[in-house]
Image: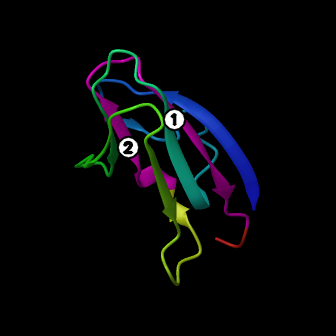
Amino acid sequence: MTFFSSTLTASTTLQQLMANKRAIKKVTQISMIVRSMGTATYIGVGGHDTQDRLLKTVGDAISIDAPLGARFIDVSSLFVISDTSDAVLEIMGDTYTGVF
């Protein structure tokens, strides 16, 4: 496993969570923490069709581990959206370095 960290400014259009680190595809765990809300009232995190995990204040966080029996999470399936374009998420985790 290799540690990574990044930030992402959430947009009003749907974007992949790892838009700033496209080379990272599979992780064993990932955490998202609100660094700044700007003028936003929420940051939505979820799949392509629904972002039902809402982060609403600085310090709110979501942590996802690989499910029991799975080796990794495919982060290309995680998306972010907000109601303004100035909220910042801090993203960190461990990449999966095993055999795919």
Please name the residue that numbered disc 2 is placed on. 79
Q: Give the answer, above or below, for where 69 lies relative to 60.
A: below
Kindly indicate the quadrant of the structure image that contains residue 37. Answer: top left
Decide whether residue 92 is among the magenta residues. Answer: yes
For this view, does 38 lie left or right of residue 32?
left
The mark found on residue 57 in the picture is: none
Please, what secondary structure does the residue beneath circle 2 have? Answer: strand
Please name the residue that numbered disc 1 is placed on. 19
- Type of the residue with mark 2: Phe
Q: Position of residue 68 (x, y in %)?
A: 50, 81
Q: CA distance from mark 2 to mark 1?
A: 9 Å
Q: Quadrant of the C terminus?
A: bottom right
Q: Quadrant of the N terminus?
A: bottom right
Please, what secondary structure does the residue beneath circle 1 have? Answer: loop
Q: Residues within 10 Å of mark 2 (few under 14, many from 20)?
A: many
Q: Position of residue 5 (x, y in %)?
A: 67, 40
For this view, does 25 lie left or right of residue 95?
left
Nearer to me, 10 or 41:
41
| For marks 2 and 1 on the same chain, the one whose residue lies earlier in the sequence | 1
Q: Residues within 10 Å of mark 1 (few under 14, many from 20)?
A: some
Residue at the (32%, 33%) spot, across then down = 81
- Type of the residue with mark 1: Ala
Q: Give the answer, above or below, for where 96 lies relative to 12.
A: below
Magenta stretch: give its range.
75-97
| Contact check, label 2 and label 1, Cβ < 8 Å | no
Residue at the (36%, 18%) spot, across then down = 85
Decide whether residue 35 is among the magenta residues. Answer: no
* Residue 95 in view in this figure: yes
Q: Position of residue 54 (x, y in %)?
A: 30, 43
